[in-house]
């Protein structure tokens, strides 16, 4: 049965503040949002409005002050820390502006990390990692150390690592912010292709309007609310 368009996650009454009185900034104020399966979404707007904060709450890296993040109607922040970490490792893939790859290790070793954390069979994880590296165009670079790869290749390794567990969601925060225009365009196309192939939800925080326009929906944060652009 095709689940495209069905509800994957709901943000209900999400509030997030920074600072101490009287200097309190309301980033999110009782904000509501629904994320559906296989959707592609860009979050845009000026620096400092809370785009990365929103992404971190969706990815359970940051807790809201109030409200709930419901994944298939389960309140994620009611989970114990180890349960939440396991959920995050298996169900959500992250790609950041800085790839955070382990220097001194090969591309395939880096991609294997989420599977090894989940205590999957090393051989199966390695096979899956190689397959994912092949898919992102690095078939001949699997066993190269990541410091020997170009910036564009390193970001492709980061994408392969994010997707090796076949997550429900890929969350990307300025994924091409450090790349030149040619490499950025390649990563943009790869993200949209993988969304269709793997049937995953993609949420991208970006200042790059070319990437934003490739997503089906675009939102920003205004007066503490998540609103369409």
Image (tube, helix red, strand yellow):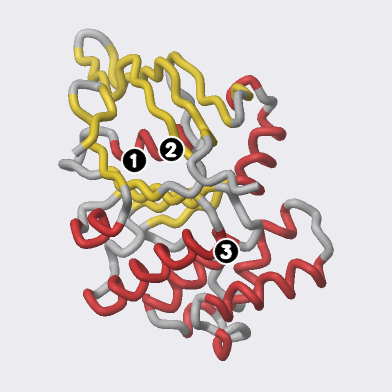
**Residue placed at 22% from the left, 74% from the top?**
181
Direction top: furthest residue: 22
* Rendered location of residue 128, percent (x, y): 70, 70
Label 1 secondary element: helix
Q: In the rendering, which numbered label is found on residue 161? A: 3
- Label 1: few (<14), some (14–19) or many (≥20) C-alpha neighbours in 10 Å: some
- Which numbered disc covers residue 12? none
Q: Residue furthest front?
A: 1
Q: Does residue 191 appear left or right of residue 70 in this picture?
A: left
Rendered location of residue 46, percent (x, y): 16, 41
Where residue 50 sits: x, y (%)? 28, 34
Looking at the image, which is closer to me, 108 or 18? 108
Q: Secondary structure at mark 2?
A: helix
* Labels 3 and 1: the sequence-earlier one: 1
The mark found on residue 56 in the picture is 2
Confirm or deny contact between disc 1 and disc 2 (CB under 8 A): yes
Q: Which residue is mark 1?
A: 52
Q: Residue at x 34, y 75 (%)?
A: 186
């Amino acid at each position: 049965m095709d689940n495209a368009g069905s509800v994957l996650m709901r943000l209900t009454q999400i509030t997030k503040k920074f600072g101490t009185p009287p200097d309190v900034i309301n980033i999110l104020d009782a904000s509501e949002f629904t994320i559906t399966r296989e959707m592609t979404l860009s979050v845009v707007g000026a620096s400092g409005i809370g785009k990365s904060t929103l992404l971190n709450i969706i990815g359970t890296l940051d807790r809201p002050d109030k409200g709930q993040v419901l994944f298939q109607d389960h309140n994620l922040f009611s989970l114990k820390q180890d349960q939440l970490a396991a959920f995050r490792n298996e169900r959500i893939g992250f790609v950041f502006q800085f790839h955070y790859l382990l220097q001194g290790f090969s591309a395939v070793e880096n991609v294997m990390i989420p599977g090894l954390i989940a205590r999957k069979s090393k051989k199966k994880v390695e096979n899956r990692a190689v397959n994912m590296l092949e898919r992102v165009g690095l078939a001949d670079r699997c066993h190269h150390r990541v410091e020997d790869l170009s910036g564009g290749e390193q970001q492709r390794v980061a994408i392969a690592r994010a997707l090796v567990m076949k997550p429900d969601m890929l969350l990307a925060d300025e994924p091409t912010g450090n790349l030149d225009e040619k490499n950025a365009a390649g990563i943009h196309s790869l993200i949209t292709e993988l969304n269709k192939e793997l049937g995953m939800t993609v949420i991208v925080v970006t200042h790059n309007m070319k990437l934003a326009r490739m997503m089906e929906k675009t939102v920003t944060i205004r007066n503490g609310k998540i609103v369409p652009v």
